[in-house]
Image: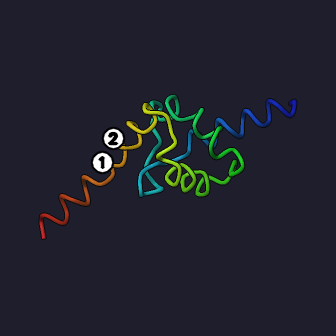
Amino acid sequence: MTRYQTFATLFAFATTAIAFQTSPGLAFSSEAQQMCSGDAMRLCSSEIPDIPRIRACMVRNKANVSPGCRAVMDREAAAAAAPRKREAAAH
């Protein structure tokens, strides 16, 4: 495997595993991977392959991500927060 292939494989793994939600256990959608891979590479490539550091970097740089990536991040964060809101309302 060439160095480029190794990097591409690590990057694909990292961008697939990035969770923009506050809960690291939630799955990262294929839409987020598609919309945010370029931003992750541009803004957070120095953090690859450390998933928690990539996630933190993307959250820190949310103001600098593309509009499409930001929309996905916002949707996925809202979806992750919905169960917590329902639980809080039930108490």
User: Is 70 placed above or below 87 here?
Assistant: above
Residue at 56% across / 45% down in the picture?
A: 17
Residue at 64% across / 35% down in the picture?
A: 12
Which amino acid is tagged 2?
Arg
User: Is 61 placed above or below 72 here?
Assistant: below
**Mark 2 and 1 residues: CB-CB less than 8 Å, in contact?**
yes
- On the image, which quarter does residue 84 sit in? bottom left
Residue placed under numbered mark 1 in the picture: 78
Report the front residue among 54 and 84: 54
Q: Residues within 10 Å of mark 2 (few under 14, many from 20)?
A: some
- On the image, which quarter does residue 56 sit in? bottom right
Q: Position of residue 86 (x, y in %)?
A: 18, 58
Say how many tags the image has: 2
Q: Dot 1: what SS? A: helix
Q: Position of residue 8 (x, y in %)?
A: 73, 32
User: Is 45 placed above or below 9 here?
Assistant: below
- Residue at the right extreme? 2
- Residue at the bottom extreme? 91
Which amino acid is tagged 1?
Ala
- Residue at the front extreme? 63
Q: Is residue 79 left or right of residue 59?
A: left
Q: Is residue 84 left or right of residue 30?
A: left
Report the front residue among 69 and 34: 69
Q: Position of residue 90 (x, y in %)?
A: 12, 65
Q: Which mark is residue 75?
A: 2
The N terminus lies in quadrant: top right
The C terminus lies in quadrant: bottom left
Residue at 62% across / 43% down in the picture?
A: 43
Q: Residues within 10 Å of mark 1 (few under 14, many from 20)?
A: some
Q: Dot 2: what SS? A: helix
